[in-house]
Each structure stands twice: as structure tokens, then as C-alpha cells.
Amino acid sequence: MEKNVSVPAKGKKGGINPVITIIVLIIAAMGLFYGVFGAEGNFEGGDTAKGHPLNMLGIIFKGGVIIPFLISFFFMVIVFSIDRAIVLNKAKGTGSADKFVNDIRALLNKNEINKALELCDKQKGSIGNVVKEGLTTYKALENDTTLNKEQKLAQLSKTLEEATTLEMPTLEKNMTIISTIASVGTLIALMGTVLGMIKSFFALGEGGGSVDSATLSVGIAEALINTGIGIGASAFAIMAYAFFTSKIDDLTFKIDEVGMSIQQSFSAHN
């Protein structure tokens, strides 16, 4: 029967609360849209409803009620990207992750487990936590006389997998939001585009077939503004998601690499 020779670390929370953050950012986007973009000074005669926009802020305001939600998407990508950057930097640890992995492998080749544990305490971060958990189990299994070698290797592998699993939620938290924005941003923009085109065709229909160029152009402009901002938000989200996914993959690869070294060292020295 297998023994649990190591107690996995408790799950940790990493990053900002997504629900509260999203609500705050939507409110901030609304404030920016109506307070700054919709300021009377951005329109002829101070008329935000019928006045011609005098600058880019006024033009964006004419994009309609969908625009503040698209602006909030920009805010979300920025805020959650900063959040991921901070969390992943902490997860990497205090020093170079590559140097840490190489130093641990060198110590394992010499079977200097205590020094490797000290190095984990200095490094900290997700990599340090997983390696420390594995090395703690390594030491306990060395002194265990109730399990054979295959059982010990299985227990060591299980401990490393559990430790890695506990770290992954911290690394991946809020990544789903960024990927969702990448997909939903264009759809929300399309909704604004459709609304703008509806206004244009409605104006054309009201004129009994004669074209009211002013009203028609406003509707088309609204459609294009929504399209442009929506595509921009989605593109920004796609780039952020790809960047942070590569960083997470790099960290997990290093964890797997040093985990394999721990198992190989145990097999060679025991």
C-alpha cells in the first residue's frame, strides 16, 4: 500500500477578482464615454445629439451605446494583462528560472538534496514550490523501507504531478477572460455595426426613397466606428493571450523538466 509521504501545499489564490474588476471597468468605461467623449465641447453648438462632432472624441461618441462596452474590453485586456504579468513574474521566482533549473539538475547529479532544498527556498515562485515538494518527498522516500523502488518512483511522480496541478490555477487565472474578449469583441462590434446600418436604411426608408445624406452618413459612421474599435479590442486581446500562454507554457516546461530530473536522480541513487 502506498503512503502519503508528503502533504501537498494548500491551493493559493493569485491575481485580482475578475467579477469585481469587470464591473468596475465597465463603470469606468461608461464614465469615460459619457463624461469625456460626450462632452459638449466636442460638438457644434454643444449639442451632443444633433451637433456635428468637432474632434475624434466626438466621432467616437457618435458610435452609439455599444462603444462603452468595447472600451471596457480594452480596459479589461490592459488590467488583466498587467495582472498576469505580475503573477507570472512572481511564479518565475526571485532569480533566473533557467539558472535555477540548471543548478538544481547539477545538485541532483551530486545527490546534494539539502542544498537543492535551500536553493528552492531562495528561488520561491511556482517552480521553486513544485521542486521543493518533490525534493521533500525524495528525502522521505529515501528512508522509507516499506515500499519497493517502483512504488517509490510512482509516489514521487504523483507528488510532482499534484504539486504542479496546485500551481496551474494561479498561472492560468483570468486567462479565460482575455480569450473570451478576443472572440466576443468582434461579435459585440458586429452588433453595433448592424445597429448603425439599420439606422442608415431606416433613414433611407423614411425619406420615401430620397436619400438624406446627413442621416445616412451618421448611421454608416456609427457602423464603421463600432467595427474599428471592436477589431482593435479583439486584436489586442489575441496578442495578449498568445503572449501569456507562451509564458505559462515556458514555466510548465521548466517544471516538467526539473521534475523529470528529480525522478531520474532518485532512480540512479536509490
Image: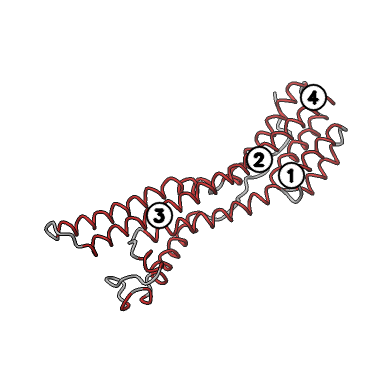
Pointer 4 or 1: first along the chain: 1
Which residue position holds label 1? 97
**In percent of the image, x 38 and y 60: which residue is there?**
67
Which residue position holds label 2? 250
Residue 270 shows in this picture? no
Q: Label 2 amino acid? A: Asp
Pointer 1 or 3: first along the chain: 1
Give the spatial CA distance, label 1 vs label 3: 40 Å
Pointer 3 or 2: first along the chain: 3
Which residue position holds label 3? 228
4 or 2: mark nearer the eye: 2
Pointer 4 or 3: first along the chain: 3
Above or below: residue 24 compared with residue 145: below
Q: Dot 3: few (<14), some (14–19), or many (≥20) neighbours within 10 Å? A: some
Which secondary structure, mark 4? Answer: helix
Give the spatial CA distance, label 4 vs label 3: 58 Å
- Position of the N terminus by quadrant: top right
Query: Label 2 near label 1: C-beta < 8 Å?
Result: no
Name the quadrant containing residue 29. Answer: bottom left
Query: Label 3 near label 4: C-beta < 8 Å?
Result: no
| Residue 170 x/y as whole percent | 60, 46
Residue 126 shows in this picture? yes
Depth check, front residue: 232 or 109? 232
